[in-house]
Amino acid sequence: MTADGVRVVICTYNSRTEVETAVVSCREEGVGDAQITVVDNASRDGTPDLLRRRFPRVRLLEPGRNLGFGAATNLGARGTGGEALLVLNPDAELEPGALSAMLEALAADPGRGAVSPRVLRPDGRLDPACRRSFPTPQVALWRLGGLSRLRPGSPRFGAYNLTHLPPDRPMVVDSGTGACLLVRRRLFDEVGGFDEGYFMYGEDLELCWQLQARGAVVWYQPTAVVRHRKGRSSEQVALPMLVHFHRSMWRFYRLHYLRGGAAWLAPLVALGICGRLAALLLLNALRRRPRVSP
């Protein structure tokens, strides 16, 4: 599998200062402009104008309103073909060799449905969202209760972001992050792409869940490195994004864990989600620069 078989979809929202770097990083990894689709979610900062001027061969879609991440990415992927789909945030940049490392990892095992790279923040810290466990009721309680932060080296309390495991270890994980995820195209189409019931956040978890429901695995490949200036778009509308983030947490829990033996935990999980949202809204009211992530 080579870069010729990859189609890239980038979803933008007021990302004029970031998206150019993302597109150029794809170019430098051997992806042609015609293989890249950018879906602009009604930006007001001139993002489409920049793309038309700088990258006239990049496919640009402008639905005229903010569709959310999942719906916009599905729109961009529709009809593009290719063997693999690379979902990339506009504030993410492929480092040299990242795409080839992901493609090699995907091709190495037909059982792999997606590959997540090692995603680093600008200061070099690992973005923990790039290798996650599913938020089971127990895992969700450890995270919402703050124990995952207090005991990150514990296999039990650090289970969500796998903080007890070294970041340079390749492994099967439950989920990667939509900031950069390489997905086998056949499987992406089979599951119907991203679940558009998630407006923002959670759709990457849901996609990985659906891939695994079809017998595929998600592989974390640490030799593929991506830099992510996380939150550049969402911080512009931090309060609505906080609400969407927590709605998505509850949606994922409701879809997959509300029934069965753990159903009795639902009120505790709902209380934890609401309590986290309230605490972050208060914290953001005290910050000069509101954030979605704590």
Image (cartoon, rainbow, N blue to C red):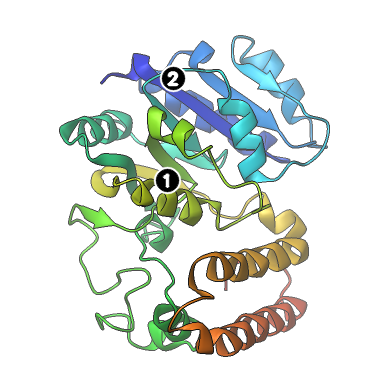
- In percent of width and height, residue 165 lies at 21, 69
Q: What residue do we see at 62% from left, 63% from top?
A: 248
Q: Count residues near mark 1 (Cα–Cα under 10 Å), then give few for <14, some for 14-19, many for 20+.
A: many
The quarter of the picture where residue 83 lies is: top left
Q: Which mark is residue 27?
A: 2
User: Which quadrant, please, contains the C terminus?
Assistant: bottom right
Q: Count residues near mark 2 (Cα–Cα under 10 Å), then give few for <14, some for 14-19, many for 20+.
A: some
Q: What residue do we see at 60% from left, 34% from top?
A: 74
Q: Which amino acid, by three-letter code, is at mark 2?
A: Arg
- In percent of width and height, residue 76 lies at 61, 27
- In percent of width and height, residue 273 lies at 61, 80
Nearer to us in this view, 258 or 83: 258
- In percent of width and height, residue 232 lies at 63, 51
Q: CA distance from mark 2 to mark 1?
A: 16 Å
Q: Which amino acid, by three-letter code, is at mark 1?
A: Arg
Residue to which mark 1 is pinned? 227
Q: Considering the numbered disc 1 on the image, is that residue within a helix, a strand or a loop?
A: strand
The quarter of the picture where residue 79 lies is: top right
Q: What residue do we see at 32% from left, 40% from top?
A: 113
Q: Is residue 246 above or below residue 202?
A: below
**In the visual, does 229 lie left or right of 136?**
right
Nearer to us in this view, 197 or 285: 197
**In the visual, does 72 lie left or right of 293?**
right
Say whether residue 291 is visible: no
